[in-house]
Structure formats: C-alpha cells, structure tokens
Amino acid sequence: RDATRGQTHPCPPAEERLPRVATLGKGDPMGTARGRGAGPPGGTRAGMAAPLVLVVLAAVTVRAALYRSSLAVFIAERVEVASPLNAWKRVVEGLALLDLGVSPYSGAIFHETPLIIYLFHFLIEYAELVFMITDVLTAVALYLAIQDFNKVVFKKQKLLIELDKYAPDVAELIQTPMEMHYIPLKVALFYLLNPYTVMSCVAKSTCAINNSVIAFFILATIKGSAFLSAVFLALATYQSLYPLTLFAPALLYLLQRQFIPIKLKSKSFWLYTMQYASLYLCSLVVIICLSFFLLNSWDFIPSVYGFILSVPDLTPNIGLFWYFFAEMFEHFSLFFVCVFQINVFFYTIPLAIKLKEHPMFFMFVQLAIISIFKSYPTLGDVALYMAFLPVWSHLYRFLRNIFILSCVLIFCSFLFPVLWHLWIYAGSANSNFYYAITLTFNIGQILLISDYFYAFLRREYYLTHGLHLTRQDGTEAMLVLK
Amino acid sequence: MAALLLLLLLAAAGPGPGRADAERERRDALQEELLLSPLPTGDVAATFQFRTRWDADLQRGSVSHYRLFPKALGRLVAALGVRELHLALTQGFWRTRYWGQPPLQAPAGAELWVWFQPTVTDVDKAWKELSNILSGIFCASLNFIDSTNTVIPTASFKPLGLANGTDHHLLRYAVLPREVVCTENLTPWKKLLPCGSKAGLAVLLKAERLFHSSYHSQAVHIRPICRDASCLAVSWELRQTLTVVFDFFSSGQGKKDWSLFKMFSRTLTDSCPLASQSKVYVDISPKNKSFPQEKELLEVSPPPTSVHEAVVQGDKKTYAVYDLLSPSLFNTSRSLNVQLKWKRPQDSSEMPIPTLHAQRYVGGYGLQTGEICTLIYNTHPYRAFPVILLETVPWYLRLYVHTLTIITKGKENKPSYIHYQPAQDRRRPHLLEMLIQLPANSVTKITIQFERALLKWTEYPPDPNHGFYVGSSVLSALVPSVTAMKDMDVEQSPLFTSLFPSSDGSSYFVRLYTEPLLVNLPTPDFSMPYNVICLTCTVVAVCYGSFYNLLTRTFHVEEPSRGGLAKRLANVIRKFRGVPPL
C-alpha cells in the first residue's frame, strides 16, 4: 500500500525517459509507446481535435433535432430529468414572477439561485442554445481535464516504474499511452451522447449548468490553478450546495500537484489548506453577496438551501428521499432528514484518508455519492459521474458485476417512464411501483460505485504485490478483503 | 305567548328604572321579510332576511344590555375589533346560468370574510380567535381556517358598511369548500333570531324541508351603518339571510304550482311580535319582457296587500307584497298560505340569460399536471364592463402563473390589474386577483396550469381518492343595467336590494361564485409506511455496508482455511477429550 508514496517526492526531469523500463520484463508496454513515438498520452492534441469536433457536432445535431421534435414537451415533463430544483418550467415561472413584481422566492415554486435568474433574464430567448453550449463546454472541459490528468497519470506511472515501486509481473496492469490516448475523447463522448445528458439538455434542466461548473472546477483543479479551482468550487457549492464535499479531493489533488506531503504535522500542508480554504470561502462570500445585491434580499438562502436541506417538496424523482418522507411519521421526520442528508457528507473524510494518493478517483466516487444521496437528484447528475467511467476503463478486468449492473441501470431507465405512466396516467399501478424502480436504480448505482471502488483498490494491491500471488505453499492464492 | 308576556313586562318596566335604557331599547329594530321568486327553470327560490338594527356603538363604551341583537355576536364584535363580518354556510351550488342572478350568492361550503378595526394590532391572531369562536357558535368546522386557506384579497372585497379607509391588510377571507352544512348549523343560526323559530317568518324554517332542496345557503352579515342621513353616528346592523331553492320536478308532482305549505309544510300564522316590519314578497314580474301584456301569467292567492315595483339588478320587477303586520291579512283566515298558479304552461326556451355568468372546470388528464379553465360570459348586447376575478388555490396545486392565458374572441386579453401571491408549501395558498375587461357579447376563457403535489401520507384527508376541493373563484363586477334605476331610500326599499351599495343608476353590483372544483392528487400507498422505511433504509445500509467494507479493510492473500464447520466442531470436542486436534 505504500507503493505510491514516492510520487510526493519531487519529480525528476521528464526528458529522462524510461531508463529502467526493461526491468519490467516481457510486457514492456512503455516500450511500445516509445516505439510509436507517442510521448505522454494526449500529446498529439491537434490529432484529437477533429474527432472531438465530430462528437460535438453529432451531439448538437441530436439535441437540435430533439428540440424541434414533439418529444421535447414529453421529455421536459419527465420527473426523472426535471426536479423541483432545476426544472425549466420553474425557471420560467421565477422570471414571470419577477415580471409581475413579486419576489420569485416568495412562493414555493422557484428554487434557483439569483445568478440563474440573472443569466436567463437576458438569455431566456436563447435558452436552447445556452443549454447546448453548456453541454458542449462541459464536455470540452472534461476532455481537457482528462487529457491533462492522463499526462499526470503517465508521469506518475513512469516515475514509479523507475523507482521500482511496482511488482515485477504487473506489466499488463500498466496503462499504456495507446489505451490512454482515446480516453479524453471517450469521456467527451460519454458525456455528450449519454441519453441521460441529452434528455436533461432537451428538458432544459439547469442541472446542465451545475455540471458545467463542476467540470470547469475539475479542469481548474487538474490544471493546478488553486484560485480558479476555488472560485468554481464556490460557484458549484452556491448552485447546489452538495459540491461542498468536493473540497477534499480538490485540495488533495492540488497538494499532490504542489508536492506538499499530506501530513497533519506538516506546516506547509496546513498553510496550503488554509490558503485554499480561505480562497474558497472568500469567493463563496463574494458570490453570495453578489446574489444579495442582485435582488436586494436574503430570501434566496432559505428558498434555495433550506429547500435542499429540509426536502419539503415530495414530487417523485429518481432519488431515495421523496417516498421515504411521504411515508414518514411526522415526529421522526426531522431526525431522518438529518440522517439522509448526512450521507453525502459522511463518506468524505474516510474516503479522503483511504484515497489520499488518488484524489481523482476520490472525486469520482464523491460525485457519485452526491448524485445518489442528494435530495432532488436527476439523471443529469448521474450523467456527470458516468462520464468519468472511461477514465477507469483499466479497472474493467477487476469489476465483478458490471454486466448485471449495466443491465439493471438500463432496464430501470426504461422502466421509469413505463411505471410512471401506469401510476399517474393509466391508474393501474400505484406509487409503490415507481418507488420500487427508484430503489432498484439506486441499488444499481451504489453497487456500481462500490464495484469500481473495489476494483480500484484491488488493482492498487496487485500493482505493489504482483499479479500472480502465491500462498506459502506455492499454490495460487485468492485475494480477500479483511 | 311567552314572548308577548315578556314584551308586556318590558313595556311596563320601561319608564321605571331609567330613561336612557328605555331609549336604547327603542333604538333597536327588527325587520323580517321573505322573498319568493319562481326561477326560470320552474324551481322556486325562497330568501329570508332578518335585519336587526341597533343604534348603539358596539365598539365604543361598554354595552351590557342586549335586547334584539344577539349577545354572542355583539360581544364578539366588541372584543375582537371586528368592523364587518360576513359568514355564509352553503350546501349546493347556485346555477346562475339557469336561475338568474341571486340576491345573495355564496360559494359551496363555508365562507368567512372579516374586516377588522384599524386598532387591531395582530390581525392574524384576532382572525384565528374569531374563526374558532364562530366555529363554536355555528357548530361549523370554521376552526379549520388557518394560514393555508386564508388570503388577503386586495380588490375583490370592499367593506359593505360604513368604512373610512380600506387598508386591505385588515381584511381576511377564507373558504372551506369541503364543509357540509346541515341541521346543526341551522339551529344555532335560528337561535340568534329575536323570536327564534317560534313566531314570524322563522316558523317556516323547518330543517327537514330546508335541507331537502337543491340549494341551501344561510348567512350572517354584521356591519356598521349610518344611523341617519347625516351619518354622524354609527348603528350596527345584523342581517341573517337564508336562501333555499326547492326543486319541484324532483318532488314528483310535475306541476309548477306551489304554495308555502308545499314548500315548508307550514303556513304563516302571525308575525314576530318584536318585528317592526314583516313582509312576504312574491316575484310576479313577467318572464318575457317583450310581451308586457302577458303580465297576468301568474295567479297569486290570497290577493296581496299591495304590489311593489322595483328595479333589482338591472331588471324591472313586480312584487306582490303581504304585510303580516297589517291586521286585515289574518282577518279572513287564521293562517296565510301564499299560493301561486301558472295560468298556462311556461315555455322554458325563453329563459332569460343573465348578463354575467361564469363556469369553471379542471382540464387535462393524469395525476401530474392539470389546468383550471374559467369561462366568463358577458351577454350584454353592447356594453363592455370590467370584472375582478379572485382565485384562491390551495398550495398542493402548484400554479404556474406564466401559463396564465386570457382569451376573448380569439384574442389575448391582457388584465389591467393583476395581483398574484404564490403559495408556500403548507403555509399559504395561491392568490390570484385580476381585473379583466369583458367586451360586449363575449366569452372570456382564462386558463392556468398547475402541477399536483405529492403530499405526506398524514396530510391526506380520509378517503383521499375522493379528491381535494378547490374553493370557488369570486367574480365581482359592476354590471351595466338595461333599465335605469332610481335612487331609492335604503330604509324603505326591500331588504334584498340593499346589502350591496348601488353606485349609480346605470350599473349594479354583482358578486358571483363559480363552481368549486374537485381535483385528484397522486397518493402514496397508505398501508406501507413501515415497509418503505425499512426498504429505503436497507438501500442506505447497503451503501454504508459496502463502503465501510472497502474503507476499513485491506486486501490480503487468503490464508489456508481452518476447515469447515464440521472440522472445527470436531476439534472443539477433541479439545475437551484431551485428544490432539485434527
């Protein structure tokens, strides 16, 4: 488990290429890479631009076609993509209230932040364009971020190989530049052409904007810009509160990038943490004050954050909250609201300890946890963390239930509208049917994430201990969690 | 008899104890009247009005001696700083389109609107207290009036009595459309009458008959009025009204001839001895205005004391009047049983359509969204007039005001005034007030979309799949009249004309209520709160469990197993036996 500790040491000059790669033995993946003359992954940026443009064009075409089709109205009404927090109908309602001279926050309909009002006050006519551009920007930001991240992974891997930290027989676990080359493109593709994102975009759910802010936050973090990272994190927190938990992975990543050892006794660690935290808090305060001056009232605080935390609107969605609180006994309600809300924040610190060397994976797991346990989740949130799945494609061989889980998620996605129709329109089913499918969908997500987590830990173990483990008596050993 | 004795005693005691008391006593008066009007459809509406007027200021100084004015209400007005109080309890719906404009309409269920004095500091507290007290007085569920069904209209409800300043923050309005009105509400209402139901017109109020009807509405209106023309002092007026519509076709006789006995199974024998005026009006105006010679369509017996002509709600009306106080009436027979016969069958195709009427319904299908549609008709041939529409929608129907469309004659009709207060979950309802211009001879369609909320399981009423009621919307308008009205002396005119102030001769005030709506909401399964709690918590636990495993444990190479259960058990036994283990 100590194998990756080395990367906190200063990096040797990158030009010094793989002198000890031969020690890896027969696999020699880096050798092939060198043979093809491709440096670190993503180095041929110009070569990748064309497919990216193609993906973007395809995505925009699909969206534009759907906007023009009769499906657009149907999709916009779907509870799976439009939660009370980010439905487009409610944004329009908020603007209409503002036009009537009523504060949009005086009612229980509008729960967007003032910045969204300000944005769409000017852009309401171009909403479709805004949402398409937002999606494209998210994809491009993720693309650039993952490109950069892959370079870092490559360097780190190379360094560890040089330092001989890997077990000798793990060559087939090493990510080759060949594999890594298409990952950023796949990420963009997964985000842009994921049906969840497309539906979310066609429904004009403002979730797309939150995703975009988070994507830019990830980009800034990976590029190492603490200031921009803090600003975007503050913006994401301001938009939907839960990205607050992404503070930990971002801080870990930046620390790692600065080669600051993560030790609680280290002064530089605390200095940097304080610096990042204060940047974050300052930008949060600035944004909130700015919002105050936009409408000249604090009404948005209870109406946005109070609404997120206390879950008063029980409109069905894909999450766990709505039916639970519809069926909850009144005097336990507050207790269970706290129990359910704490889930998002609860895993952050243990994950930070366990994954302190792998902040990007931590970020991915945390995003998934947010999308499972937030009070008004939509498919747009699911799409964001699913875009990261290609980044972990090297874990594929260690995933245990990926086929079953993909089937569960796909079938649930189809069953959502079916059971909704049976309950709400046909009247031949009741709320339990839809509830059951949300439960299954969430179990699927939870198992998927824990499967990825398991695979990640297992690969890390193999990297340090060797792929072919033997028992003391020489027979092939099984690996167990203890 | 007892009442007469009491009166005699009072009269004897009058000059004795004090002059002031006697004078005050003389200054209160009771007027009672019954208006019988045959409706265009062949039904009959009977409207009772009992007006108690007291020349004393309830608010100022301690009034301790009550005579005609009910003490319960008088003390309520004084204690809570009520300036005006209007309470109506209604069963059924007044079908304006077929029955014409009512003298006083009320929405189905309970309606309460109150103006408070400007001296009241905490209006909400006073309102809460008032609705609870009224709930006790009238045995109605008015205690269910809380912030989720109370609104503060800005334009629809003006004070009807004497008022200086109309700060609408002193007004509260609430409707309980689910309220069922029955005998237990009628009995306390009757008890407020000075003669009870012992004498006068009130003997006709027999619950058994009143609730066997298509429409029943009883109301209490308290308001301050000018004592005299100079308006230097205030008098208080209590009006108790009761409107009932009898449906003669359903009673199986098939004939439209009717009498007091047929309707109430009672006849009038005397007037209330405390009343200073006691009259029965029968509407005998010709139905067809174009043929005034057909006046003699109806035959009334016995012959009326007099005939009164008045312009009521833009229509010239003729009334046969029976004055119960005139001694000649009870000379010939012991009792008065007003009868009315049609001389020849009435053709129902010639039904007059009221100038303003409205209808409302819920559109859409499924339990996710819906649409409230209101159709407002202006049938006036050449005059346009504005109407104020007040819509109160409970919070669990989430209105989207941006979907509000008002279409008249195929064109968008922009309201000249709009006041919208969005609902807050579990705290206050939506309030939408609009001033809409209705062009002559037009239909205006108002639609607004809503979304149905899923409530907590404890928030559903019993029988949740019956649906939720949405109170009637209120239309208030000054309708231009076809016939010019003369300015009448309010004190002299029949009571049913004088509650709403008429602004001038060319128009009259109308307040209409549309149908209440019944809307279905999606329901959770009420039988399985435990199951849901268990299942959802299991999912959370699955997440916790798998993460806990991955976070706290590390990978290890599997040690050679210590054998199965059987081997271990065998070893335990061997240990006891002192034999080396397997």
Image (tube, coloured by chain):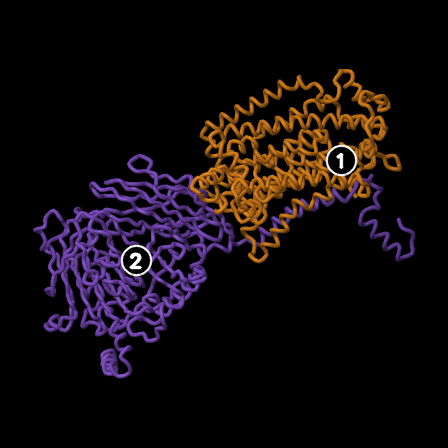
Chain colours: A orange, B purple
Q: Chain of mark 2?
A: B
Answer left or right for B377 relative to A48: left
Q: Position of residue B362 (x, y in %)?
A: 37, 45
Q: Position of residue B389 (x, y in %)?
A: 34, 47
Image quadrant in which you'd find residue A143: top right
Q: CA distance from mark 1 to mark 2?
A: 74 Å
Query: What's the residue at 24%, 70% (across, down)?
Result: B29
Q: Secondary structure at mark 2?
A: loop
Q: Would you name the residue on which mark 2 appears?
A: B160
Q: Would you name the residue on which mark 1 appears?
A: A255
Tag 2: residue type?
Leu
Answer left or right for A43 relative to B421: right
Tag 1: residue type?
Leu
Which of discs 1 and 2 lies nearer the camera? The answer is 2
B520 or B330, which is in the foreground? B330
Q: Are marks 1 and 2 in contact (CB under 8 Å)?
A: no
The answer to whether any part of residue B574 appears in the image is: yes
Q: Answer above or below: position of B379 versus A258.
A: below
A68 or B70, which is in the foreground? B70
The residue furthest top is A36
Query: What's the residue at 63%, 34% (across, down)?
Result: A214
The residue furthest left is B293
Q: Secondary structure at mark 1?
A: helix
